[in-house]
Structures are given as structure tokens and as C-alpha cells.
């Protein structure tokens, strides 16, 4: 779940609601192909339920992706087609956010673009950190929240709790279970965290 936390934690309520307004859910049966190696990616995907597998052209499984994983984000940093195939390892549900809509939104809304690309950067940094840690030690267990926090600044760590709330909001919204004020409460919490962080950075006043 921490992967989606790195991503969603950088976004605002308006961004999340925009994702939901332009995105749509996809139900994938086991072995359904979500991303085909060598074929352009048409959307950014958030895995809401199930498990995905990343495979080579020979069918070797490179990774398993669980709930909360973001898939297809690299296509927003370069135009090269994916080098691996992503399949549904079991029945899955994903939220698909069209690439064309994302690119148009980023072009027209500078604030959104800054938050969105920072979110991708933070997500990729976390993945790189895990890859470096596992060099020569592929069986290492996943990093705990405490271990992850050692190399992250306070802003990123504080955003993780907010992001988990956003993910809950997305899940409830796509299944028509959320109330009308959930996003407002989450945004208020996010703003409160920002104010708290600013106050913490102010130098102490001596008398």
C-alpha cells in the first residue's frame, strides 16, 4: 500500500476528484493482459483489487504488484513503449485514467502538473531505493514503514497517512459508498498537516 501512498500523498482533493471524473474502472479476469510489451500505454492505472504480474517476453515473472500499486507511470516521463507485459495474476479491478486526458490536464493546469510529476518522482525514487537495497539480496523482505522513513523527509512521511485516506476515498467512490464530505475532510486534514509543518520549521523565539 505504501506505493500508492507515495503517489497520492502529493495530490489535492481537486486532483483526486478529477481522476475520478475522467477515469473508469476495469474488471480483469485472471490472465487478462493490461499492458502489452512493445505497445504504447493508453492510461495510468491504480490497482484497486487483486494482483498483477510483470512478465518478460519469455513469460518469466519479474514482479508481483498488489493493491495500491501504480502502473504505467513511466510512459509520462518518456515515450518509449513498455519493455514488459503486465497480466492479471488473479481477478483484478483497476482505475484507468486516460493518458490523453492526463497530458491535456497537465498542459492546462500548472499546479496539477507540478503535483502530478512530483508524485511520479517520489514514487520512482521509492522504487529505486528498493532496487538498490536488493542488489545481490533479492530475498530481502519489504522495507517497514520505519525503515522507509529513515531516508524520507518529513513532508513525504506526513503525506503517507493522507494518501491512505485518499485511497479509501477512491475505493468508496468507485463503489458508491462515500459520503458527500469525505474529500472535504481529507483536504482539511492535508491543509492542517501543511500548517503544522510550516510552524515546525519556524525558528524558536527567545525572550
Image: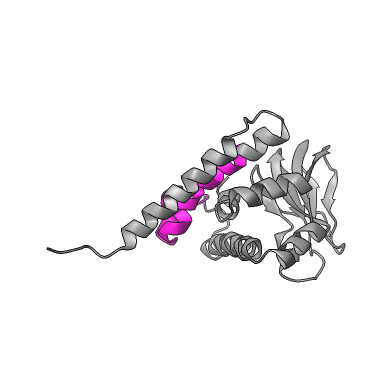
Quadrant location, the C terminus: bottom left
Q: Which residue is drawn at 60% across and 48% down?
A: 13
Q: Which residue is drawn at 55% across and 48% down?
A: 2
Q: Main secondary structure of the magenta part?
A: helix
Query: Can residue 131 be seen in the rendering of this structure?
Result: yes
Residue sticking out furthest to the right: 39
Quadrant location, the N terminus: top right
Residue 105 is one of the magenta-drawn residues: no
**1 horizontally vs 146: left or right:** right
Residue 43 in picture, x, y percent from top left: 79, 55
Q: How is the image coloured?
A: one colour
Q: Residue at x 75, y 71 (%)?
A: 78
Mark count: 0
Relative depth, front residue between 79 and 89: 79
Q: In this picture, is 104 found above or below 184?
A: below
Q: In this picture, is 18 found above or below 27?
A: below
Numbered range of the magenta stretch: 142-168
Residue 59 in picture, x, y percent from top left: 82, 54
Residue 152 is one of the magenta-drawn residues: yes
Amino acid at each position: 500500500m505504501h506505493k500508492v501512498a507515495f503517489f497520492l500523498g502529493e495530490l489535492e482533493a481537486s486532483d483526486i476528484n478529477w481522476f475520478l471524473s475522467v477515469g473508469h474502472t476495469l474488471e480483469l479476469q485472471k490472465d487478462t493482459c493490461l499492458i502489452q510489451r512493445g505497445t504504447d500505454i493508453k492510461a495510468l492505472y491504480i490497482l484497486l483489487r487483486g494482483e498483477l504480474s510483470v512478465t518478460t517476453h519469455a513469460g518469466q515473472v519479474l514482479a508481483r504488484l498488489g493493491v495500491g500499486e501504480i502502473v504505467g507511470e513511466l510512459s509520462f516521463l518518456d515515450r518509449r513503449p513498455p519493455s514488459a507485459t503486465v497480466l492479471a495474476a488473479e481477478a483484478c479491478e483497476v482505475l484507468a485514467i486516460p493518458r490523453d486526458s492526463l497530458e491535456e490536464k497537465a498542459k492546462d493546469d500548472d499546479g496539477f502538473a507540478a503535483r502530478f510529476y512530483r508524485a511520479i518522482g517520489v514514487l520512482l525514487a521509492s522504487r529505486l531505493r528498493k532496487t538498490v537495497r536488493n542488489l545481490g539480496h533479492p530475498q530481502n523482505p519489504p522495507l517497514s514503514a520505519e525503515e522507509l522513513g529513515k531516508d524520507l523527509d518529513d513532508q513525504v512521511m506526513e503525506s503517507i497517512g493522507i494518501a491512505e485516506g485518499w485511497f479509501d476515498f477512491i475505493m468508496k467512490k468507485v463503489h458508491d459508498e462515500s459520503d458527500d464530505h469525505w474529500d472535504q475532510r481529507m483536504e482539511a486534514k492535508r491543509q492542517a498537516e501543511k500548517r503544522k509543518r510550516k510552524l515546525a520549521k519556524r525558528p524558536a523565539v527567545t525572550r
